[in-house]
Image (spheres, grey):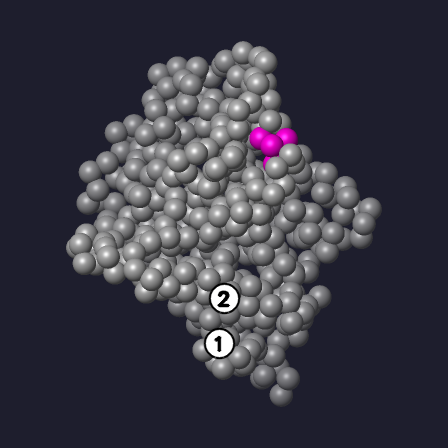
Amino acid sequence: MASKSKSDRMAPQRNLTKTFLYWAIAVFLIKLIIISNITQGAWTGADGENYLKGVTGLLSDGIFSKESTLNYWPAGYPLIIYLLTIFGKSWVLATLSILQSAIFSFAVYFFTKQLSRTRLKNYSYFSLILILLNPTLSLSSIVIGYESLAASGSLVVIGIIIKDLIESQESRFLVNLGYTSVILGILTFMQPRLIVGSIIVLLIWVFIRKPIKIAALCSIASLLILLFFPATLIYRNQKSTGVTTISTNLGVTMNIGAGDGATGGYDSKKQGVICDITTTDIAKADSERVACVLKWYINNPSQVPKLFFNKSIYFWSPWSGPIVSGTMNRNPWLKIDPIKSIAKDPNGAKLLLSPFGKLVAWTWLLSGVFLLFYGFYILWRAKFNERIIGVVVLVVILASWAVTLISIGDHRFRLPIMGMSLFLQAIGLKTLLKGGKVPMVEAPALR
């Protein structure tokens, strides 16, 4: 009887996995049709021109190009596009879109497949639908920008961690850790601001799985692998221009989000701290500006709560509407966004800016944040592997949120963690739709 029961449990699992795969392939094929109808093969994102300018420099002078954008912005993403030119320069952007779309579909499939192997199986299909069909996140894979790859990489990493927790195979742990370290290294290679969450996630996972001494050694090894990738950018910049840094825009970015009268966003009329820069060295000047801004925060504690509140609102703000704030004007979703269409009509614009319109916008924002934390609460109460999954996912989200607090409030910075936030929101929303009942399967926890 026990054998038959086990067989019964396995059959639906195989069907669910196939369903996930069919969905992932279907969305990818639809994107191929969209890509074939885009002149360049990809839409231009917020920093698209800067990335392409960097690629032009790389094509002209090689990886040690002196092109200024490669020093100001992290050169990782332009280098990835540059590597794709081996498949043909004329259709490199189409190649980029196809690659990003394939990786996104695989990431969602892999993550939800592993999720379906836990007691969260009944949440896995709903999570797949919300993540895979989210228009902004899904269509970002056809946009020139690191965000889609970052979101996909985060999903794969969490998927690997879930797989390791379920199987608990000591012989596979180091292999899984190696894969994860490389993926997180590539993510920080494209966007160094992701390094905070990457390091914390690795440490949590390793110290849960291994005794302290072994965990310490594994952590050192994994961090060396992770840090190798951003270190190559420092080497590139030092060889090309003598600037020993990953990028030189951190101080500028932080300064925009600080200062007397600043709102914390790009659209602030007043922004910036007056800093006494004592050097002409670009890297040292950036470091001095960072220190200057941090000092301002320390010396002006009364202004910090308001700035942090504003940046949090901007981080979680909708893509359109009366409380929108950020650099997502080129979001492909906005081409068909009904809110955007309403705003074009004078009466519609009045409605959106009315108390009712603002109430709807604030309800949407706050309900999304509530569902996220409610979803985490459900996982925390579930204990075992599900609690660990919740903690790791929340760490990824909070780390990006925290980095935003000391830089600029921008809803575009939410894209890399959207897969994670949508997952927690799926947990929260489905639980509410079930009347507060948690639809978990009764599967034995391995840890």
Return the x and y of residue 337 as percentages of the image width and height.
26, 56
**Is the residue under label 2 in contact with that under label 1 (CB below 8 Å)?**
yes
Return the x and y of residue 294 as percentages of the image width and height.
61, 33
Residue 164 appears anywhere in the view: yes
Crowd class of label 2 (few under 14; some 14 to 19; many from 20; radius 10 Å): many
Q: Which stretch did the figure color magenta?
A: 293-297
Q: Quadrant of residue 4?
A: bottom right
Return the x and y of residue 411 as percentages of the image width and height.
42, 47
Residue 100 appears anywhere in the view: no
Q: Could you tell me which secondary element the residue under label 1 belongs to? A: helix
- Left or right of residue 383, residue 113 in this image: left
Reading the image, the residue beneath label 1 is 432
Who's the residue at 47% across and 71% down the image? Answer: 429
Q: CA distance from mark 1 to mark 2?
A: 9 Å
Task: Name the residue nearer the viewer: 86 or 133.
Answer: 133
Amino acid at the residue labelled 2: Leu
Task: Name the residue nearer the viewer: 282 or 304.
Answer: 304
Reading the image, the residue beneath label 2 is 371
Q: Quadrant of residue 41?
A: top left
Who's the residue at 37% across and 30% down the image? Answer: 51
- Left or right of residue 191, residue 164 in this image: right
State the predominant SS element of the stretch in magenta: helix
Give the residue at the far right of this rendering: 213
